[in-house]
Image: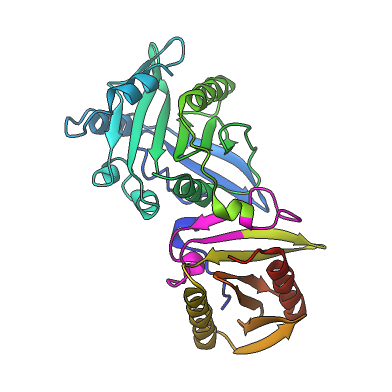
Amino acid sequence: MSGFVISERESKEAGGRKGVKASMLSKTSYLKWIAGVGVLALIVVVSLSVLAKRRAIASDAGYAPEPQNLTEMVTGLTPSGWKIYDKVRRFTPENLYNLIDGGAELYLAYDMVKMTFAIFEKNADTGTYIELSIYDMGTPTNAFGVFSAERSEGLPSLSLGRAGYRSGASYYIWQGQHYVTIMASDSTEELERIGLGLARKAMAVLPDSGEPVWGMTALPLADRVPDSVKYFKADAMGLDFMQNTYTAKYRKGNSRISVFLSRKGSPGSAQAAVAGYTRYAGDYGEGVERLTQDGIELVLCDMGGSFDVIFKKGRLVGGVMSVGDRHVAAQAAADLWRQLSYE
């Protein structure tokens, strides 16, 4: 059993992206089919009966409207020749599940504050629409966490917000403390163009405090695979003692190495995390060995067919996961240790 256990929030259904959005959007279903390292196609299924249900949800008087300034902002994004169905709505942590039943847990795990939602319909064509969701996650770090959890490798990137990508005619963007999704009813050139315009206008008006995300700069840039950084607020690698943890992939020759990094409150807390990882490896692996690599103290965990290596540096906890060769694993962990500053 490997030390790298993909969290439930990051898992994918066999043959496609897990229905984080498909289950929560009653007008739209999306399946992102993955082959090798990329996504080959996006299929959108539209149902009139589902549309009726969506409109019933959006029209429910139990949902409080957004503050006027944000409502006006979203209204001002309406594409020419389009209209907003019903009105702009706000969802809170308490009622988000009504809109995205089965998918709300991801956003709540990253402490979502509120979500602003609107449906844009093409005039005289109610079967053509775009759904806009603006998630206020409270901090840029939380917003990046949700964005990174939903991102798949191989999708076209966008020069919008702090980071973004496109899948078909739909757009997913991280901007400061906001995570924005723009999801189209079909994958057509027209909707791709309209959605991109909507995304650009939204980024122009959504604020960004500029507050940095620690892990994005703490993790070394050299040899890092683009768009591979992810942030887990809790239960990183499926381990309950690994909180506020970043993971990333690095190129090492012809191989890719997965690394993790977490900043604890104190060196003592960091040592406790190393001890927890050691116990975990002892319970589920095939042996634990303490070794010194170039003067750096490491814990090498034989996970049966692969190796994890963990270390402490001040109040930092880091290491590598699921490396096939023990010597490569130890060297990669030592290299990571040397590139980190003491915290």
- On screen, residue 156 above or below 269: above
**Viewer-proximal residue, 229 or 213?**
213
**Viewer-proximal residue, 227 or 84?**
227
At 66% from the left and 81% from the top, the residue drawn is: 298
Where does residue 291 sit, x and y in percent of width and height?
A: 69, 87
Q: Does the magenta segment cover residue 117?
A: no
At 42% from the left and 23% from the top, the residue drawn is: 129
**Viewer-proximal residue, 312 or 196?**
312
- On screen, residue 2 above or below 71: below
The residue sitting at the right extreme is 253
Q: What main secondary structure does the magenta stretch of the protein show?
A: loop
The residue sitting at the left extreme is 62
- On screen, residue 49 above or below 250: above
At 59% from the left and 60% from the top, the residue drawn is: 247
At 55% from the left and 53% from the top, the residue drawn is: 214
Q: Quadrant of the N terminus?
A: bottom right
Q: Does the magenta segment cover residue 225?
A: yes
Where does residue 288 sit, x and y in percent of width and height?
A: 60, 88
Where does residue 195 sit, x and y in percent of width and height?
A: 52, 24
Where does residue 190 sit, x and y in percent of width and height?
A: 56, 19
Magenta residues span: 218-247
Residue 20 appears in the rendering? yes
Residue 13 appears in the rendering? no
